[in-house]
Structures are given as structure tokens and as C-alpha cells.
């Protein structure tokens, strides 16, 4: 990965560690027609002996994200790259199936109009004394429910807010406790 940003929290990022992260993430390049043009962000942190690696790869229309924790930083790097690789393969398989069934598809290599997620953080406090510790702002990309579920799974989240192309309303898909999916729509 050409544009790689590696930063450490409570850990010094040595040249050897940075090289290891770069080498491992380069395994993912085989899945893309062209290398990602935006920065791949890697955060390495250590807290109470737990080594955490978080990787975010913004691509046109897709945001890949994975995190892993273990008692060894190198093991965490290996595991997070494996997770990203599984996400990409799973996503491409689903997209391929959608195309074969005649539905509109999306692949990781295809540029899309609009940014999927633009994240900003801020510290605020509610007037009731309830503390909001993080605010996320993002551009709603029009998509169908199935694509929203794919995006949610790619991000590793249990819900996803999107602009529904069919109803032209803001909807939320979420993962239920039984493993199936739910949709929240306006009345």
C-alpha cells in the first residue's frame, strides 16, 4: 500500500513494525485493479498488555475496517489482515452473485459517485448532563437495502444508516440477535 499512515497510541512505532504492517497489508493489493488512492490508516495501541490493531481502508463507495486484539502486536497485525481479506472475498462473492442474478452490483474496484463515510469527531455535552463522547457525520449514499447490508457487514457494524433508493427516505438496517437483518423505516 503506497499511502500508508501508521500511528501508535501508548506505543512507539518502530521501523521494523511499520515495515511489517506495510508488508502484510500489501497482500490485499491483489484484490484491487488499482491500488487505493486514499490513505490507509493503521492505529496500533497497547493498553494493559492488550495489543490492538485497527485498520481503515477508504475506497470509492466502500469503507473497509477491521480490528484485532491479542497479547502480541505482530499477531494482531496478522489477524487484522486476515479479517480484511475475508471481508473483501465475502463482499466480492456477494457482489458476483448479485450480478449473476441480474441485480445491480458493486465491486470494490468500481468508483462510485459520492463519499460513503466522512467521519468527524467532536466532544460535546448535552444540556441534560448526558455526555455525547463522539459525533459522526457522514454523507448518505443512495443504495438499496441489500447493498446497505453488504456495507454494514464490510464495516463490521451491527447497524447502518443509508438513503433508500426505493423509498427515497433515510433508513437503518441492523443485525438482529438471531443473525438475520432488520430494517427501520419512516412511517
Image: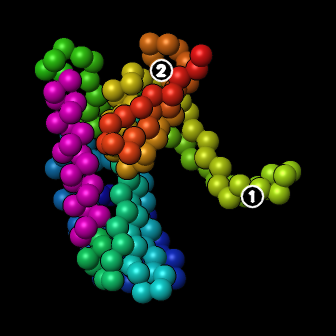
Which numbered circle lies on residue 50?
none
Q: Quadrant of residue 175?
A: top left
Percent coordinates x, y for residue 59 in the rendering: 37, 42
Percent coordinates x, y for residue 102 in the rendering: 19, 14
Percent coordinates x, y for residue 49 in the rendering: 42, 87
Residue linked to disc 1: 131
Of circles 2 and 1, the one toward us is 1
Q: Quadrant of the C terminus?
A: top right
Between residues 14 and 43, which one lies in front from this camera angle? Answer: 43
Q: Residues within 10 Å of mark 1 (few under 14, many from 20)?
A: few
Answer whether residue 155 is magenta in the image. Answer: no
Q: Is residue 86 left or right of residue 165?
A: left
Residue linked to disc 2: 164
Separation (CA) of disc 2 from disc 1: 31 Å
Of mark 2 and mark 1, the one earlier in the sequence is 1
Q: Is residue 95 left or right of residue 41?
A: left
Dot 1 lies on which element? strand
Amino acid at each position: 500500500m503506497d499511502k500508508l499512515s501508521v500511528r501508535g497510541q501508548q506505543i512507539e512505532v518502530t521501523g521494523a513494525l511499520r515495515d511489517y504492517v506495510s508488508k502484510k497489508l500489501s497482500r490485499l493489493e491483489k484484490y484491487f485493479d488499482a491500488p487505493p488512492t486514499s490513505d490507509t490508516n493503521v492505529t496500533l495501541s497497547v493498553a494493559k498488555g492488550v495489543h490492538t490493531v485497527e485498520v481503515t481502508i477508504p475506497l470509492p463507495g466502500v469503507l473497509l475496517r477491521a480490528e484485532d486484539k491479542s497479547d502480541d502486536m505482530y499477531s494482531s497485525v496478522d489477524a487484522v489482515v486476515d479479517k480484511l481479506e475475508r471481508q473483501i472475498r465475502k463482499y466480492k462473492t456477494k457482489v458476483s452473485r448479485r450480478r449473476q442474478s441480474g441485480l445491480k452490483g458493486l465491486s470494490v474496484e468500481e468508483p462510485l459517485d459520492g463519499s460513503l463515510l466522512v467521519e468527524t469527531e467532536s466532544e460535546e455535552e448535552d444540556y441534560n448532563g448526558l455526555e455525547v463522547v463522539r459525533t459522526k457525520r457522514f454523507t448518505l449514499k443512495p443504495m438499496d437495502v441489500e447493498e446497505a447490508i453488504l456495507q454494514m457487514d464490510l464495516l463490521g457494524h451491527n447497524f447502518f444508516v443509508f438513503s433508500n433508493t426505493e423509498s427515497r427516505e433515510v433508513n437503518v438496517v441492523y443485525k438482529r440477535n438471531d443473525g438475520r437483518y432488520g430494517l427501520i423505516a419512516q412511517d
